[in-house]
């Protein structure tokens, strides 16, 4: 458990969009729960997105995800299939929130 990289609370997750724009997400980690199957604590993180940035995520492809851990930084390049899957999940959230389709 101690070998895993830890992420602090704050703007530690960044998304690089197809138009070279960077969107910073506010990371909010939880306290973790003990999982008896793995004999380790499981942690989930929630990233908060402002409504302005949410609309950017709807219309631009997310090409990279950058995570700032406590001891290092890691950039993950997304494949075309991953980009499309991520965009579809963002559209699904937008439809559930009644933000799509856009109405004048």
Image: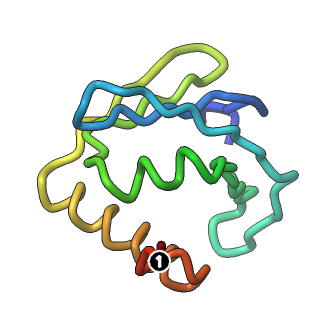
- Asked which quadrant contains residue 21, the reply is top left
User: Mark 1 highlights which residue?
Assistant: 103
Judging depth in this view, the residue of 27 and 4 nearest the camera is: 27
| Residue shown at the point (43%, 36%) measured from the top left | 15
Q: Position of residue 5 (x, y in %)?
A: 60, 31
Q: Position of residue 42 (x, y in %)?
A: 70, 59
The furthest residue to the top: 71
- Quarter that holds the N terminus: top right
Image height of 46 relative to 64, above or below: below
The furthest residue to the front: 104
Judging depth in this view, the residue of 83 and 37 nearest the camera is: 83
Q: Position of residue 76 (x, y in %)?
A: 32, 35
Residue 41 left/right relative to 90 = right
| Residue shown at the point (67%, 32%) measured from the top left | 6
Q: Position of residue 66 (x, y in %)?
A: 43, 29
Image height of 65 relative to 54, above or below: above
| Residue shown at the point (34%, 62%) measured from the top left | 86
| Residue shown at the point (23%, 58%) measured from the top left | 82
Image height of 25 relative to 70, above or below: below
The kind of secondary structure element at disc 1 is loop
Judging depth in this view, the residue of 12 and 5 nearest the camera is: 12
Residue 19 left/right relative to 66 = left
Image height of 74 relative to 46, above or below: above
Q: Look at the image and name its color scheme.
A: rainbow
Question: Is the residue marked by circle 1 packed among few (<14), some (14-19), or many (20+) residues within 10 Å?
Answer: few
């Amino acid at each position: 458990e101690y070998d895993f990289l830890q992420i602090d609370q704050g703007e530690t997750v960044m998304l690089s969009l197809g138009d070279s724009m960077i969107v910073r997400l506010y990371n909010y980690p939880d306290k973790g729960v003990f999982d008896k199957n793995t004999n380790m604590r499981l942690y989930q993180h929630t990233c908060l997105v402002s409504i302005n940035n949410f609309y950017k995520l709807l219309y631009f492809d997310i090409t990279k995800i950058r995570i700032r851990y406590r001891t290092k930084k890691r950039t993950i390049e997304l494949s075309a299939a991953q980009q499309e899957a991520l965009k579809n999940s963002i559209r699904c959230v937008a439809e559930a929130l009644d933000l799509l389709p856009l109405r004048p």
